[in-house]
Amino acid sequence: MSIQDEFEFIRSIRPAHYFHEGLVVGIGDDAAVYTPNKGFQQIVCTDTMVEGVHFLRKTMEPFDIGFKCLAVNISDIAAMGGIPKYFLVSIAIPSRWHEKDLQSIYKGMADAAEKYKVDLIGGDTVSIADHLVITVTLIGEVERGKAQLRSSARPGDVVFVTGTLGDSAAGLHLLLNDEFNLPEDDYQYLVSRHRRPKPQVKAGRIISEVDRASLNDISDGIASELNEIADMSNVQIVVHKDLLPLSDSIQLLPLEKQFEWAITGGEDFELVGTTSKHSFEVLKKKCEQEGIRITKIGEVFEGSPSVYLQEKNIRKRLLSKGYNHFKKGDSFGSI
Amino acid sequence: MSIQDEFEFIRSIRPAHYFHEGLVVGIGDDAAVYTPNKGFQQIVCTDTMVEGVHFLRKTMEPFDIGFKCLAVNISDIAAMGGIPKYFLVSIAIPSRWHEKDLQSIYKGMADAAEKYKVDLIGGDTVSIADHLVITVTLIGEVERGKAQLRSSARPGDVVFVTGTLGDSAAGLHLLLNDEFNLPEDDYQYLVSRHRRPKPQVKAGRIISEVDRASLNDISDGIASELNEIADMSNVQIVVHKDLLPLSDSIQLLPLEKQFEWAITGGEDFELVGTTSKHSFEVLKKKCEQEGIRITKIGEVFEGSPSVYLQEKNIRKRLLSKGYNHFKKGDSFGSI
């Protein structure tokens, strides 16, 4: 893109309106300025997606790339029980990318921004030789003291998960391989779970009302996420294979694959966590009222940090490996 | 780097202590959490540096890259009159980069963080095929209503600049060309102005106390920065060539080059702005007490947005071009 094109481009991506009254200065000065709400703490996270590493042109349309890069950050705020509010986007653009595709990236981002009521307040646009790189930084807020951390699991807790598991990894598999002949609706469902994740902000907000919960979003598969909770809470976690919630669509695929994807697949961007039995009952009721699926999948025990998968009477250790390709999500994620 | 190396690496870059009491959750959960200070607004900016575009291994040591990437963001907060506080860093690392060099990048960053009392609170580490990309997002704060914007210049204002102009561009020129034989001290001074910019946080804080000032940091040269102020304030700005502050070292280089660098060179990361005559006198006094050089370089007039350079009786229009190579600094900068 020429510099002139780029000025036009920046003008074209400026939001036509802002959702949040607290915003004082948006795009266009040295930095953005906003007034935080009284009684709230600020939550910040950042995630980077690299062409050829986190996505391929083959698996993601430009619109999806924009949508997903914002969505995975929103998911991190959801995993703290917070409300996403403002974001900045830095994009390094190779000259071989066309302006039309860049516009599509921003349209995808704007679509996610509209759905989750977040304001684009700043960013940086630079050139790069080879591969597109997008970094989104998202700022949210949560009532003081209400952020739900990975370190809050306690023995006796119920382990829960929102939605269904493994769909995103199944969708990616379908995009990369032509081996299963699924009905069109099921194919589209699984692929869209990979391309357009739905961060569970509403569920996170309900969980933030609970006295104490540990919480993580599923960027790397439950094996990895639960190990993080076990490590940071110093507890043992047992998950029951037959309790794992699977979508109707994934159940059309081979059984051993279903569980592999559900446990180590990653990128479902559902929430996984633990809370007391009593709180879980309250949580479940509130979620059901909001039409949010939430499922008990295991229990927390005393013991050195570890995660087990139980099937009938056999317990198998689940290690923290899992998804290390197309990886997203953590505050300091893995290469 | 292997995944194991990378875990070690992340552990090694965790700050040993945090400067700011408001920090509730630092590195290690889905997102960082902090409590904003009462009566303060939050300031956020982000800047990306790309290997081969914003720096070359030839011109910047890994330590410098880390230092500068944080410093240029601190400079954006300074240009709002704010206090820098928390930062996140996202880094895309090609496998050909060695861990030792990555450590040096973080050491450079930690050095700037220590100097300016900012806390590393999160980030992302990903792989990339070809070129290193670093994105820093910085959060600062300023007393409510005290952020100094580019849109605040008024006819009758004095135009001022901190420090000296053109040194960074001169330093870069020296690094890329072997054509002048400067005394070692002068060479080192100019090169360090390019590699280790000193964001003018203290000056910005003094300027934030002024009733009204327009303010910008010099990432792209004063021609570009003053045009931004002229555009956003709808005023005409006249700068006097003989008032431009030049360092002793730059004055050892050819005359026509000195002014080219001073006006369009960029990356000085000094502050440039305007304020009333009265406020400038107050400002100047306070800066002198703190040992900060601040110089009147021109005046603001009514008129359609434009910037002129005056030399004796001749006024020449200064356009907003300038530095578009190794460019840094804006909230949505140019490619």
Image (cartoon, coloured by chain):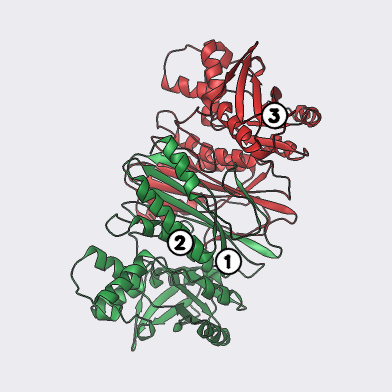
Chain colours: A green, B red
| Mark whose residue sits in front, 3 or 2 | 3
Cα distance in 3D space between marks 3 and 2: 42 Å
Does residue B279 appear left or right of residue A156 in this picture?
Answer: right
Name the residue that disc number 3 marks: B302
Kindly identify which chain the residue marked by label 2 belongs to: A
* Local secondary structure at mark 1: strand
Q: Which residue is drawn at 55% across and 70% down?
A: A151
Residue at mark 3 shares a chain with residue at mark 2: no
Proximity of marks 1 and 2: CB atoms separated by less than 8 Å: no
Q: In this view, does B180 lie to the left or right of A24?
A: left
Residue A253, horizontal then vertical, whole percent: 24, 78
Q: Residues within 10 Å of mark 1 (few under 14, many from 20)?
A: many
Query: Toward the viewer: A95 or A214?
Result: A95
Q: Would residue A265 be seen by someone viewing this image from the given angle?
A: no
Q: Which amino acid does label 3 sit on?
A: Glu
In the image, residue B224 lies at what x, y percent?
55, 30
Q: Are marks 3 and 2 in contact (CB under 8 Å)?
A: no
Q: In the rendered view, tell whether residue A65 sits above or below residue A313.
A: above
Mark 2 is on which residue type? Answer: Asp
Of A134 and A215, the residue lying toward us: A134
Image spot of residue A149 (x, y percent) = 56, 69
Q: Which chain carries label 1?
A: A
Residue B302 drawn above or below residue A164: above
Q: Residue at x 65, y 30 (%)?
A: B272
- Which callout, 1 or 2, points at the residue further toward the start of the chain? 1
Tag 1: residue type?
Ile
* Residue at the disc numbered 1: A83
Residue at mark 1 shares a chain with residue at mark 2: yes
Q: Where, quadrant-wise, is the N terminus of chain A in this rendering?
A: top left
**Who's the residue at 35% across and 66% down the image?**
A194
> Left or right of A330: which side holds B283?
right
Q: Mark 2 points at which residue?
A: A111
